[in-house]
Image: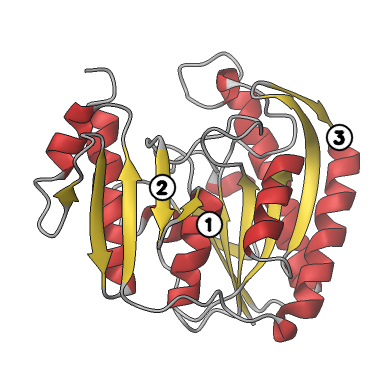
Amino acid sequence: MKIYISADMEGITGVTNADFLLPSEPNYEYGRRLMEHDVNAVIESALEGGATEIVVADSHSSGNNLRLDHLHPGATLISGIPRDNYMMSGLTSDFAAVFFVGYHARHGMPGVLSHAYWFKNMTVNGVEVGEIGFNTIYAGLLGVPVALVTGDDKASEETKRIVPDAVTGIVKQALSRTSAICLSLQQSRKVLMARTKEAMGKIDQLAPFQVKLPVEVHIEFMHSGQAEIASCIPGVRRLPNGTITAYEAKDAITYYRTMEIMASLANTTRFF
């Protein structure tokens, strides 16, 4: 049984603010150790639950946070950027399930470090989504169900609205966007392993997220300059309000890669 893990950092045990997220920040080395703690707990439990192959995509920032010599030896690692389909790179239809580890709520929601790539808002067929929702839809287009999502309580709530049958592992309770009540590492390991075991046990009962192609994707940027650049992408049009662009995706590749290009452009122009 092949399991795909997409691992972010904002929803990891003990991570509460930007001090943990980038190499230039004071708590980054601690943050990556916490990330390894959560990912390894999920890998270990998945292997105990019958996984025969596990692929982990390091899906935070540059994708170079998880250290290979600190990763459970039962998994392989996708790291670095650029790469096709960034947070979902390497996912194919022959995987039994997707696990999102260390995920977070979408932009504008009260969860810890809530955001959605470099955007203000994202909608798919008129429904607001963040990284949980967007990536769940992508997995569904490939025919793979999302079985587990770990993060704070707000990420769990968001998950349950999108895929109510998925298992969620709550490792912290959000107090604000940059504070939380955090489980100890020992407590969170127990939670993560128990929820992973539960997810492994119900994979056969889960269905991929259903969405019919083509899908209409709207991306709202932080400012009009980002939307101007994004509208240069073939197939992308800019809506009248100035900060929203839209595109129609007729397949999974167009769905994800168009957004991926937009996110890269938004990142390069975010301060202008």
Residue type for callout 1: Gly
Residue 12 position by quadrant: top right
Q: Tell me the SS state at disc 1.
A: helix
Report crowding for label 3: few under 14, some 14 to 19, many 20 or more residues within 10 A (C-alpha).
some
Q: Is residue 198 left or right of residue 219?
A: right
Does residue 71 show up?
no
* Mark 3 → mark 2, Cα distance in angstroms: 31 Å
Q: Is residue 222 above or below residue 129?
A: above
* Mark 1 → mark 2, Cα distance in angstroms: 10 Å
Residue found at x 21% / y 29%: 224
Q: Is residue 75 above or below residue 83?
A: below
Residue matched to label 3: 183
**Sequence-wise, which precedes: disc 3 or disc 1?**
1
Q: Is residue 161 left or right of residue 253?
A: right
Residue found at x 71% / y 79%: 203
Residue type for callout 2: Met
Residue 54 placed where, x, y %? 60, 69
Residue type for callout 3: Leu
* Mark 3 → mark 1, Cα distance in angstroms: 25 Å
Task: Look at discs 3 and 2 and give the one toward the viewer.
Answer: 2
Report crowding for label 2: few under 14, some 14 to 19, many 20 or more residues within 10 A (C-alpha).
many
Given residues 87 and 254, the one toward you in this image is 254
Residue found at x 59% / y 24%: 20
**Labelled disc at residue 133:** 1
Q: Tell me the SS state at disc 2.
A: strand
Q: Is residue 171 left or right of residue 107?
A: right
| Dots 1, 2 in contact, CB < 8 A | yes
Residue matched to label 2: 122
Residue 44 placed where, x, y %? 76, 61
Q: Is residue 63 above or below residue 15?
A: below
